[in-house]
Image (cartoon, rainbow, N blue to C red):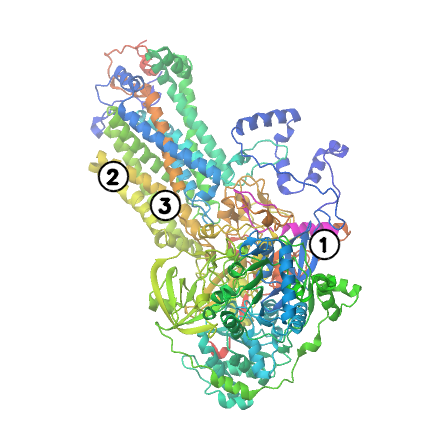
Amino acid sequence: MSAVHPIGGPIAGPIAEIGETRLLPAHLTPALVSEQVTSVTERPARWGWWLYFGISLLFLGVLAVSVSYLFWEGIGVWGNNSPIAWAWDITNFVWWIGIGHAGTLISAILFLFRQRWRTSINRFAEAMTIFAVICALLFPLIHVGRPWHIYYTLPLPNQMGMWPNFKSPLLWDVFAVGTYFTVSLLFWYVGLIPDLATARDRARSLFRKRVYGFAALGWRGSHRHWRHYERAYLILAGLSTPLVLSVHSVVSFDFATSVIPGWHSTIFPPYFVAGAVFSGFAMVMTLMLIARQVFGLKDMMTLQHLELMNKIMLVTGSLVGFAYATEFFVAMYSGNEYERYAFTNRATGPYWWAYWIMLSCNVLSPQLFWFKRWRTSLPVMFVVSILINIGMWFERFVIIVTSLHRDYLPSSWGYFRPTLVDVGCFLGSLGLFFTLFALFIRWVPQIAMFEVKAILPGAQPNQHRHRVERHEPGHHAPPALASREA
Amino acid sequence: MTNDRVFWRSLEAKAQPEQARERATGSDVVKQSIDAPGLIRLRRRQFLSLSGAISALVGIGCSIRRPVEKIMPYTEMPADVTVGVPSHYASVLTRRGEALGVVVQSSEGRPTKVEGNPEHPGSAGGTDLQAQAALLDLYDSERARTPTLQGAPRTYAEVDAVLAELAGQLAASGGAGLRVLSEPSLSPTFVRLRAALAAKLPNAVFHTYAPVSDSNERAGTQLAFGRPLLVQHRLAGAQVIVALDSDFLMTETGSVEAARGFANGRHMDSAAGKQPNRLYAVEPTLSVTGSNADHRLSLPAQSIAAYAKALAAALVGQGISLGALDSELGRPELAGVASPWTLAVARDLAEHRGASLVIAGSRQPAAVHALAHAMNSALGNVGRTVVYVTPVDAEEPLHFPDIASLARDMAAGKVQTLLVLGGNPVLDAPADVQFKEALAKVPLSLCLSGWRHETGELCTWHVPQAHALESWGDQVSRIGAYSVQQPLISPLFKGRSDTSLLAALLAPAASAVSERDPYLLVKATAAMHGADDERRWQRLLQRGVGPRNVSQITLGGLSLQTAAIQSALRALPEAAQLGLDSLEVVFLADNKLLDGRHANNAWLQELPDPITRITWDNAALIAPSTAQALGVASGDMLRLTSSDARSIEIVAWVQPGQAPGSIGLPLGWGRKRGGKHALGAGFDVYPLRTSGAPHFTAGVKLAKLGTRYPLSQTQEHDVMEGRPIALDATLDAYREHPNFGQRGSPDPSPPPLWKTQDYSQGPQWGMAIDLNRCVGCSACVIACQSENNIPVVGKDQVARGRAMAWLRIDRYYVGDDADQPEVAFQPVSCQHCEQAPCENVCPVNATSHSPEGLNDIAYNRCIGTRYCMNNCPYKVRRFNFLNNNLDIPETQKMVHNPDVTLRFRGVVEKCTYCVQRIQSSKIAAKREGRELKDGDVVTACQQACPAEAITFGDIRDATSAVSRAREVDRNYALLAEVGTRPRTRFLGKVRNPNPEMVG
């Protein structure tokens, strides 16, 4: 093998001259990594986890009740009406899909760009992606009037010769989100295999051995395995990368291809992608700050990681802010009265408050990250990440509801008020998300151990020529590490 | 449609599968699907196993089942019923003193649709909204089902026994102590029987009362000409019309015919064509008529008389002398009214002698009516734009003194027996006559009414009244056309009619059946009106209308009783000073419920009021300036206290166009009895109404209660925001730019994104709606509801924006002055866009274009993503947010049109251009072996429109009415710039302001 690290680019130590520092503290060893990460799944859960899991389950129950009531009575239990046929349902859908973006971005794009700092957070972010996409998929499913006929959207052969309408952006959604979910799940799972094998190897009970053993698909850490693994991971990363751009572009087509002022806009695909990355990073940040506090994973999710993520949020937040400004400019410059009205109405109409919440949360609050002091302050970044989550929800609400509530004919203008069931479905989706997350951090190695090991100080053969690592069983690390022993 | 059906399983298909498939496909959707590559190559078994596996995977857990329903076939087929083929019967309905000839569709023995009878002069094929809603009244499950004696159910045999006993007693006493109270009648049979009863029982007294009637009109002709006559306007010939507090297009008598005439007088085919009419409206509250006026003046109702005098004085100034009246008129100016409103209007009238018309409204006192007659005579309009007709019931008394005298006698114990034949005096008699208290003093009272309402409950006996569609009767229209009211169904709840009750008193049970059976009684009357043999009788029933009795019509030669008019004018009270602590209230015939008789009709309740757009409620209408001065906002609860200390509580509504200082109070709401829809809807204003001032009264104080009341509107935004929506132009602007519509709403004709549908074959359906003809009456909306089984959702759901109407009438206010707005009406339903935005976005192809240019929905395919609703620029798509067809009473299920599916919750629906009518016309044409011809397909809205504003047909046929209408220079497509290429075109409205009054 050449000296090219399979996942992290050319192996080189931090270049002190340009101010680079170590990604991970020096005292970490592969054994310590395995211990710290895997033990979470081995120890009995702490009371804190039970509390968190219990609350999440409670909200999941809210979802079950809300959705059951919704299915029993019909969409009328929500606040949707004519002209606002979509409201919180699609707002939630787009919000969750957006959140689901960071995982793939971190895993795939940063992987391809050889950003090694991603290794501590990619598992986490990918899991979040999958759970967010599950939550997102829930809403298109339940928002239809007759959910028992939802399979009409799938191209199933049938004796009537009826196919879905391939012109409809909603159908594109079905394919785009379906593909994204499938690829993300595969990507996550493939990335998990070596760590599942570690968990298997460390397992003491037969049950754990069997379960993790089954899930690890017979991984033994041979060169052949690693070779296949790296190919597969690279291919999946390559497949995922365009998806990061395509999914939210397609979701944005739901709006961009329509004729409604405020929706009909060519800026939407990049604007939505930037927003998605923005909100996804904010959600990863929120969750990571909690997890690193609760599980004591500060060694692997270092302040440097957090700062790098804050920089990305600053960039994407500013991109989103630029998109807001462009939208306004185009509306005014176009001379189209409906377009102009739609945007003036956003800022000054009955939903002015939603617009200004969106603007202050999304555009103003990340500006704090220009300053290193705030960029590296845990409380500041926690609050800002929450604000961004709120702001991005409002962005979708503003786009969907304020555009619909006053379109062409003033006779048909209306106003949307959510009902308790709307709130229940949204909070319930959070419950679903956090329940899945609770199960994830309890049962799955939440940090990609083998990747972290690969960037440990000890993993750098040309740096630590004299120090010999013993390859312990259960410490699966990539061949770059192993080949050095041979 | 191709007639040579090709089945793909033929030899030909085997030989040339591609070609056969091509020919076998009906629509593009199917074609697209079949041509989808790959999948069609599946073998049958592969296909079955694949679909089985997929549906097993996908369909798990979906277990919502349709309820099991059993259907019963006929065991013996009735001779004249073909299942699926409706029959039509001519009949007649009454509405406020006018007969409305109708043709009723009967499906498998139940009436399912009311349409206007084109042969009937009062209808000419159109109807009003109450006639369209009559079916729901018929099938109302809350109608009284059995006779009751003091609330306890009784049989009809007992009723007959009581009536027979009563008849015996009365015959002995000559009818002493008997009073019969009925509503004004147009039925010669009823009048004949009543006269016979009066002759037989000389001591009996007959009374007539309706809370909203033409009593003042009769008093006016009595005053002007010395005998009671009905006034019949011929609006089509009138070039200049002045409406003095007259809502002749909506709530006044004969509005259907008036709307037709008005629209004809307004119609413009091209810029070079004739001059359209000009309407001046002077009224206290914004009415439908005022909304159509070229100039409208808000004046308190009490000032209308002074305005009429000033206008007459101005006419004198124009050389139109009213003879001896001239000295009585005073000055041609009126304080607070701009001088052109008398001088310029008078000049306009004077310039159109013989082609002008002054109309006094039924709220105005007799003197104003007489003055209007005097002006019309002086202008030479009599015999041209106005004729006078001898009424059927020449003896009808003045209603308010009459009901007051009846109540007095009842209270004094002079009344032993009271028959209330229709009407609801306990609710609607003036408050000061205290009818309810007086009724308690009557030993035996019998009320005949459809519902056990306020009066029915308090009378000793209550007998269910048969609906007009259930009983025999007859009516004479205003201009003397005789029609027979044919029953279409035997009474659902075994009700009786007023004639049958009169007959029971008149003829003892032993007498000949011809004297008791309403059918034979009506037939006997018909014989007197020309249908004197069986053939003519059958002909009368078929046509629905007999020859006009021209002898009743007076074209002229009436001499004005100037002395009487003079003294009546002198006796007119001075208008009281109005202020914030002394307001005027005006009692309005409600646009939907009239006097409250339709209060339990959910269609009418949910129909937005044509002006306020409020559903399920009435409200006190207050001018914006007055409301501001009083600090009152829409939705505030108010207490109104009259000068004689009567008070009501009602919600406020700030209504542009209401006269400052005047409050409009629509009658007939806030019912205490009479069905679940009637209860709790709106506020009862009758307690404020007295027999002395039944139409308007001043000196009313207003107090805010400090509470709010929610009102449900279907349209909450009243202005067009400067957008080209309901386009109009003044006549001059129209002459200058005949295509002002397309200038305002230009069609960019963008190139299509993909191959567009081929519209070059078969009929291509299209519609034209002439905004110049549309008066905004909303009859079309109810017609659509009735035809298309559109559900009612209730006040709460309307407030949530979920009204289901496929066709709505948008109402916009135009102009800067909130107290004097102009109004634009625009009926909007699905525009059937050729480039329909809704179709592209449906993920399941549930909505797509038919080869005939219809934007169709397959309800069974719709999964309810609602994307189509979002992407419809016209917002005409409606979603079944909840199951709106749950819990429909059994009787009410009969109202449904069997040709239109009921929609389940979760699917989107909208106007189909009445596709079921298109299909049945096509089938009929095919059966007759001919091509469809123009006029074969008439949509429900088009049929109902009294003003003929809607044209429908094949736009490929250049000679069709709709093609010609769409070529009128005023045509434009709504929101053409969106590029939807709608099949519905609008023809812009032309306003015809008086140049002297502009600016």
Q: Chain of mark 3?
A: A
Q: Is residue B920 magenta?
A: yes
What residue would you read off at disc 1? B932
Q: Chain of mark 1?
A: B
Relative image position of residue B634 (x, y in whole percent): 39, 61
The secondary structure type at the circle numbered 1 is loop
Relative image position of residue A249 (x, y in whole percent): 44, 39
Amino acid type, residue under disc 3 in the picture:
Ala
Q: What's the CA distance linking mark 3 and mark 2?
A: 19 Å
Mark 1 vs mark 3, foreground winner is 1
The secondary structure type at the circle numbered 3 is helix
Q: Which residues are magenta?
A: B901-925
Question: Tag 3: Cα neighbours inside 10 Å, few (<14), some, or many (≥20)?
Answer: some
Relative image position of residue B489 (x, y in whole percent): 67, 54
- Above or below residue B846? Residue B613 is below
Residue A369 is tagged as 2
The secondary structure type at the circle numbered 2 is helix
